[in-house]
Image (cartoon, grey):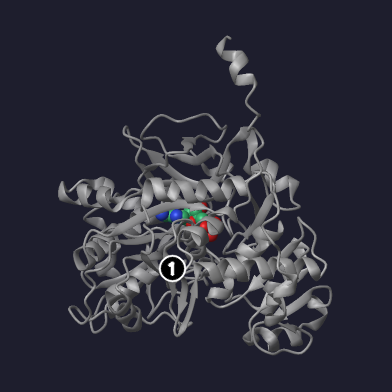
């Protein structure tokens, strides 16, 4: 018998139907009594987690949801988030996480845009929902507390409706709509399918941090975003997902929790949270020796701050670069690579690392031609982790995915060894006197000034230059610092056209619900009454 004939007898595995629920199912089988979810006094084992998810899936089906229907949730961090996500997977539903810090009207936009049949929310949103009742008239609501017009969350746990097992799902079946956190414009729903979820999990374990069964993973950032996504590989490996209790980010209680629970992995921190930890922590107060990994990303961290963070907490930082359209998975840098680059004083410590195992990426010019190493252009990526498009938005999907590559809107360049240096979002680049200035380059220098705690740079209108480079600086407490000091300091490191023309001082920088500095919002104030690049130009127009 020839080899081909033998193989043709094997049933085809192409198009295998694998529901992402299998990752929880397996951990429930391997570690049924192992702790899965932990918050305060609440402890849920993997067996209980699976059973609760199957109950939620079954009760959502009993409430009228059919496979493919959307279920939104707007919940402060709690075990309920993971139960709802896996409950939706089990029932073949599409989960729509909403940032718990959004205004009720912003929440309503996402509920409406996604066509969600069900909204699961916390009691704290009741007033906002009541004040905008008409916007929520078409969605069935469940509340984790008590709320008028909503059924209790407990109704979703009735055992008699529980699914016996997860439904079958094909790799291309949608399971998640990730609404972009966009600091301007309406958010768009990046569609995720089961294949993408599998890639997110496998890529995380392969490239970033190999989570082990029983490992203590702490969530202190919104689980509707990065932290909830890191929870997926943690569930797949049967780790403990511990969730901090305070809604606000309190550094001392965070570090006390790390000590008490012997946390080995902080799932996700935005750079602004890392900076806050550096500012507020009391050296030596807590034993942090259990920490092996702190995953960060979602926005640039300045090299000076990263060095300080590693000096304070050790070589535990793990960086990821991605976006909702290619969840957390374009480039990355493991903690070992951070340590190696630091040890040799290699400037690539300031990069976003190298392209992830299962992804292809490079930079392109304004005509989508690939650029050689060292040339700046828009970062494009492709691979199984890239979304098939935006929900109900074919124009934006076609534009973002033209030529089969995801156009990230981020400007950067790769070096000879494939390290990605991100410069900025295309929309944030300043064009001053015809020269491109990347705000991040200027910020990297300002942050080195010993009297500077934080800063942000953007372009403001200028009659002569078109746009002038402008810095907003947060000085360290108790120091005096003038605009001239900052500008002169920049002059020691950079070409004249890149130096800020003016500097404003503030006590703190505004940040989004996901910890991103609201650079565009700050900039817009300076552009009021001017025509031109409010909100920036298109990536295509600006890439040089
Ligand atoms: P989101 O879709 O909300 O996760 O935002 C994705 C955007 O955040 C990316 O397109 C980048 O502009 C930015 N971003 C994500 N990770 C990093 C990183 N490691 N360094 C710099 N910027 C990042």
Q: Is 120 on the left or on the right of 437, as rendered?
A: right
Element on which disc 1 rests: loop
Report if residue 490 is visible in the image.
yes
Snapshot quadrant of residue 35: bottom left
Q: Is 465 on the left or on the right of 276, as rendered?
A: right
Q: Nearer the viewer, residue 487 or 161?
A: 161
Q: Residue at x 76, y 55 (%)?
A: 68
Snapshot quadrant of residue 288: bottom left
Q: Which residue is mark 1?
A: 34
Q: Is 296 on the left or on the right of 290, as rendered?
A: right
Please identify the quadrant where the N terminus is shown: top right
- Tell me the crowding category of disc 1: few under 14, some 14 to 19, or many 20 or more residues within 10 angstroms, Cα based: some
Name the spot of residue 24 as percent of width and height, x first.
Answer: 54, 59
Name the spot of residue 73 as percent of width and height, x first.
Answer: 65, 71
For this orientation, the residue located farthest to the top is 2
Snapshot quadrant of residue 157: bottom right
Q: Nearer the viewer, residue 498 or 169?
A: 169
Q: Total marks drawn? A: 1
Decide: is 80 above or below 27: below
Report if residue 97 is visible in the image.
no
Decide: is 172 above or below 101: above
Q: Residue at x 26, y 76 (%)?
A: 481
Name the spot of residue 289 as percent of width and height, x first.
Answer: 21, 69
């Amino acid at each position: 018998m020839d080899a081909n004939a033998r193989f043709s007898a094997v049933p085809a595995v192409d198009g295998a139907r694998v529901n992402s629920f299998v990752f929880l199912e397996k951990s429930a089988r391997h570690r049924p009594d192992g702790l899965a979810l932990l918050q305060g006094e609440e402890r849920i084992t993997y067996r209980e987690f699976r059973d609760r998810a199957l109950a939620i899936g079954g009760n959502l089906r009993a409430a009228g949801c059919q496979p493919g229907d959307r279920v939104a949730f707007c919940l402060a961090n709690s075990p309920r988030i993971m139960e709802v996500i896996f409950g939706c997977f089990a029932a073949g539903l599409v989960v729509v996480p909403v940032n718990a810090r959004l205004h009720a009207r912003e929440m309503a936009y996402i509920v409406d845009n996604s066509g969600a049949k069900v909204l699961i929310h916390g009691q704290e949103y009741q007033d906002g929902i009541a004040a905008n009742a008409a916007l929520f008239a078409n969605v069935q609501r469940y509340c984790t507390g008590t709320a008028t017009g909503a059924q209790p969350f407990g109704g979703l746990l009735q055992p008699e409706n529980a699914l016996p097992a997860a439904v079958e799902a094909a790799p291309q079946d949608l399971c998640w709509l990730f609404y972009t956190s966009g600091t301007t414009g309406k958010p768009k729903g990046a569609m995720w399918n089961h294949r993408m979820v599998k890639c997110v999990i496998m890529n995380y374990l392969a490239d970033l941090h190999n989570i082990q069964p029983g490992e203590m993973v702490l969530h202190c950032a919104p689980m509707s975003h990065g932290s909830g996504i890191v929870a997926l590989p943690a569930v797949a490996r049967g780790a403990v997902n511990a969730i901090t209790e305070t809604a606000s980010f309190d550094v001392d209680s965070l570090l006390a929790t790390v000590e008490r629970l012997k946390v080995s992995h902080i799932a996700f921190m935005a750079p602004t949270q890392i900076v806050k930890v550096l500012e507020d922590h009391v050296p030596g107060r807590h034993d942090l020796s259990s920490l092996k990994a702190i995953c960060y990303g979602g926005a640039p961290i300045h090299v000076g701050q990263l060095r300080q963070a590693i000096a304070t907490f050790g070589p535990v930082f793990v960086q990821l670069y991605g976006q909702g359209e290619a969840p957390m998975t374009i480039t990355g840098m493991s903690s070992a690579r951070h340590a190696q680059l630091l040890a040799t004083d290699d400037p690539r410590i300031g990069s976003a690392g190298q392209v992830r195992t299962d992804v292809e990426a490079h930079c392109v010019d304004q005509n989508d031609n690939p650029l050689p190493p060292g040339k700046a252009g828009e970062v494009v990526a492709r691979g199984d982790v890239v979304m098939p498009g935006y929900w109900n938005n074919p124009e934006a999907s076609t534009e973002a995915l033209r030529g089969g590559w995801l156009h990230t809107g981020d400007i950067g360049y790769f070096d000879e060894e494939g390290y990605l240096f991100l410069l900025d979002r295309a929309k944030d680049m300043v064009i001053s006197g015809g020269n491109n200035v990347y705000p991040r380059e200027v910020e990297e220098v300002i942050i080195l000034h010993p009297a500077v705690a934080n800063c942000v740079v953007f372009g403001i209108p200028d009659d002569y230059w078109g746009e002038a480079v402008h810095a907003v600086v947060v000085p360290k407490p108790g120091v005096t610092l003038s605009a001239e000091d900052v500008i002169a300091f920049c002059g020691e490191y950079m070409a004249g056209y890149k130096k800020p023309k003016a500097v404003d001082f503030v006590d703190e920088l505004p940040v989004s619900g996901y910890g991103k500095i609201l650079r565009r919002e700050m900039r817009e104030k300076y552009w009021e009454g001017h025509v031109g690049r409010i909100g920036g130009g298109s990536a295509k127009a600006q890439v040089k």
